[in-house]
Amino acid sequence: MLYLILFPLVVIAGLLVFLAIQPGEVRVRRSLVMRCTPEAAFDLVRDLGRWPDWSPRLLHEPDAERTSSDAPDAAGGWYAWNGQLIGAGRVTQVALHPPERIERRIAFQRPFKFKGAVTWEFAATAQDGTPATEVFWIMRGRMPFLLRFLAPMFSQFVDKDFELGLVRLRALLDPAAPKLNIRFPGAAELPAQSALTLPFEGGMDDMIRAMEAGFPRLAGVLAARGIEPAGPPFTAYHMAHPKADRFRCDIAIPVPPDTAPGELTLKHFAGGLFEVTEVQGSYDFMALAWHTATGHLRMAKRQWDRARPALEIYATGPDRAASDDALLTRICVPVKAKG
């Protein structure tokens, strides 16, 4: 009987000790050089009414409820959001120091409570001999006691969000800068398909080189054999560990299922339900796009079906796109049906 009483107390005490030794601190600092004046960057960022134009969060839920004060671009002004996917929170202007710095306070209400300080800094610099501004986006705060263990994961997620937001902000300030647009059409049923493939396993840099050589090789083989591709080329990811820089995938071009493999490998890929993310922009942004796609998956509470490979489909590739900005890629993550 004493054991039954003491055991839960020991577990609770251990949990409290574990939480007490967690630092719980959230500290994120990102920057990007933009070809514009500090004044132009300052004026755009200070106006919380322009937040939807480049917000990394609202990409996930453009129709989320948004409210703001009468003067969101002034000290004391505020902007709030309330959505099914992105939760709820508010950003308040604390102090404006044009054109060098903006100080803000951020408060998340959902999916968990968090308060932090946000600072924007604008430093004049040069890029390729052209006047430019390095824009810094900084956030500091501390997770609630019971959520301290989530601080590293939350910091990493915010870090990538800041990177995406700065890329989108730069596109507004510099018309010549690379563009990145991301949409979330939602879940879709994709058919099964067959493809001639080249397998790869290794790190990111080697994978990029393998793709640059592999897709032309596959296309050349098909052309030489008079076979018309049955769809756009794609990469099927069977394993991806970005932190460990390890990937296992198939570089593939769809073909009719009765195609003879020849010197290549013919594989059959199962169809089914996939969560689709559309990415318009350079392949240099793909790692960031994957982060955003998997983040949306978590927000939508969809369960990844690891039994099937995730697909990176090059709907509009370099052979058809007028520029990198026009490249269209679909990230398709296999998911299990809800319920």
Image (tube, rainbow, N blue to C red):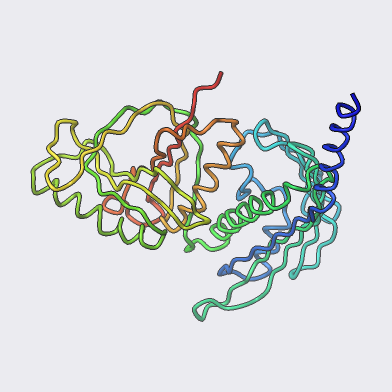
Q: Nearer the viewer, residue 215 or 50?
A: 215
Q: Quadrant of the C terminus?
A: top right
At a point 65% along the width and 63% down the height, the residue shown is 30
Q: Is residue 192 above or below residue 219?
A: above
**Residue drawn at (29%, 48%), measured in percent from left and top?**
251
| Quarter of the rendering containing residue 259 | top left
Number of numbered discs: 0
Residue 190 location in percent, x, y? 36, 28
- Left or right: where does residue 181 sit relative to residue 62? left
Query: In the rendered view, does 71 fall on the left or right side of 297?
Result: right
Q: Is residue 214 or residue 45 the one in the foreground?
A: 214
- Quadrant location, the N terminus: top right
Q: Residue at x 25, y 59 (%)?
A: 213
Q: Residue 113 sits in which quadrant?
A: top right
Q: Position of residue 275 (x, y in %)?
A: 48, 33
Q: Is residue 255 above or below residue 55?
A: above
Q: Is residue 42 left or right of residue 267?
A: right
Residue 107 on image: x %, y %: 80, 46
34 vs 217: above or below: below
Q: Nearer the viewer, residue 213 or 75?
A: 213
